[in-house]
Amino acid sequence: MTDAPGARGTALPATNHPHPATSGTPTVLTGATVVLPTGTVKNGRLAVHGTRIAPTVPENAQVIDVTDHYVIPGFVDLHNHGGGGASFTSGSVDDILKGIHTHRLHGTTTLVASTVTGDMDFLTRRAGLLSELAEQGEIAGVHFEGPFISPCRKGAHSEALLRDPHPADVRKLIDAARGQARMLTLATELPGGLDSVRLLADHGVIAAIGHTDATYEQTVEAIDAGATVATHLFNAMPPLGHRSPGPIAALLEDDRVTVELINDGTHLHPAALQLAFHHAGADRVAFITDAMDAAGFGDGRYWLGPLEVEVADGVARLVEDGTIAGSTLTLDRAFKRAVTVDGLSVEDAVTALSATPARLLGMADTIGSLEPGKYADLLILDSAYELKGVMRRGEWVVGPQLG
Ligand SMILES: [Zn+2]
């Protein structure tokens, strides 16, 4: 579906707001509540030189007073299908860049582009295109969601295109992504599932258990084979039962697994989210968007791969049967919700939105926390947790708006 009909909607949100802050100049942010991996510092400062966080304040640094604001690391999204009216599965390169930019405006400084189920030829072509954008540093790699998923838990994936995870097919996708495949979501209980998990692990690609109908025991087997992520825990898998605990109990109890959670208020009841969070802890939870084209754009008709989606009041559902079809979430909203609705600490929310996904991607030495030498990927939030500035690689994506 390379030329799916365009979606309704209006223009992109405004990009740079006028402010004296200049991109690329050595900068020091002062007076802030800075969330560091070692703890939160009040009235702290953070220096930026070039693309990196600097150990000391550079000479001639521009001083920006951000008193009464938080400075936190940029968000890292492991699972994202598009935004700004654009789809990572079907859009042109320009569309994809527009989608990436939309999420940057909402604080996501690193994202992995996710595809939805398609036929193998289509997916290998998309993998080639997305890998070029990964090589250019626009995205952190590719996540294949489907086609190796369970027809019983297909969610918003086209049933006709689902297939069993034969390792030869998994290998084709890994190769097509030219070293940029980061994650593949599969139903590990299907024929070839465990061999595919081993293959993925051998190639350094995250094997993510999702859209699965596995039992508890089958899930334990898959984790033992090397699966390390739960794709949107709770969604598109059997519920937790007291005599058949299913995948949820197996994924939550094992320290080797990180669980994705979609914190948009639609996909999960707050109590389910809190249960998972308190059990796994911030080091094993990654908040994701699972966003589709309408994120940061608006209600209307869209395409998710070959399936038509109606977005109303920010909730995306398949036209054919009303199944929830991804989200319209952006991670700034997920952060605010985590702190103000779910009662998480700012530090735990930062960990689940930055450090944990960065570690999973093997990028913890360059992103995921505010430490000297790492990329200057940082956000400014006001005391109500509203986003007021976004810097990526030392450049302002959204200049500080300090009122
Ligand atoms: Zn998804």
Image (cartoon, rainbow, N blue to C red):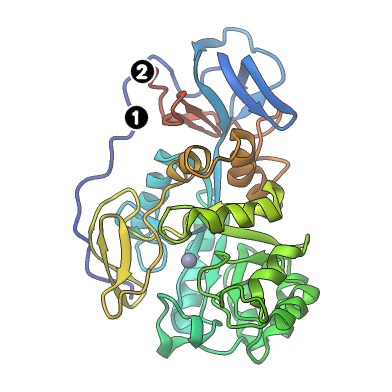
Residue 299 visible within the image: yes
Q: Place residue 169 in its image quadrant.
A: bottom right
Q: Which mark is residue 371?
A: none
213 is higher (above) or lower (below) than 14: below
Task: State the image coordinates of residue 63 (x, y, percent, origin top left).
Answer: 52, 9
The C terminus, quarter of image: top left
**Residue beneath the point at 56% across and 82% down:** 148
Task: State the image coordinates of residue 246 (x, y, percent, origin top left).
Answer: 65, 78
| Residue that badge 2 annotates | 19
Residue 208 visible within the image: no
Q: Are marks 1 and 2 in contact (CB under 8 Å)?
A: no
| Residue that badge 1 annotates | 16
Of the pair 377 and 216, the residue shown nearer to us: 216
Describe residue 311's horizontal placement relative to residue 230 as left or right. Answer: left
Task: State the image coordinates of residue 51 (x, y, percent, origin top left).
Answer: 59, 30
**Residue beneath the point at 22% across and 64% down:** 6
159 is higher (above) or lower (below) than 257: below
Describe residue 215's horizontal placement relative to residue 234 as left or right. Answer: right
**Label 2 sits on what residue type?**
His
Cα distance between the residues tagged 1 and 2: 8 Å
Residue extending farthest to the top is 60
Query: Badge 1, how many Cα within 10 Å: few under 14, some, many 20+?
Result: some
178 is higher (above) or lower (below) than 403: below
Describe residue 146's horizontal placement relative to residue 187 as left or right. Answer: left
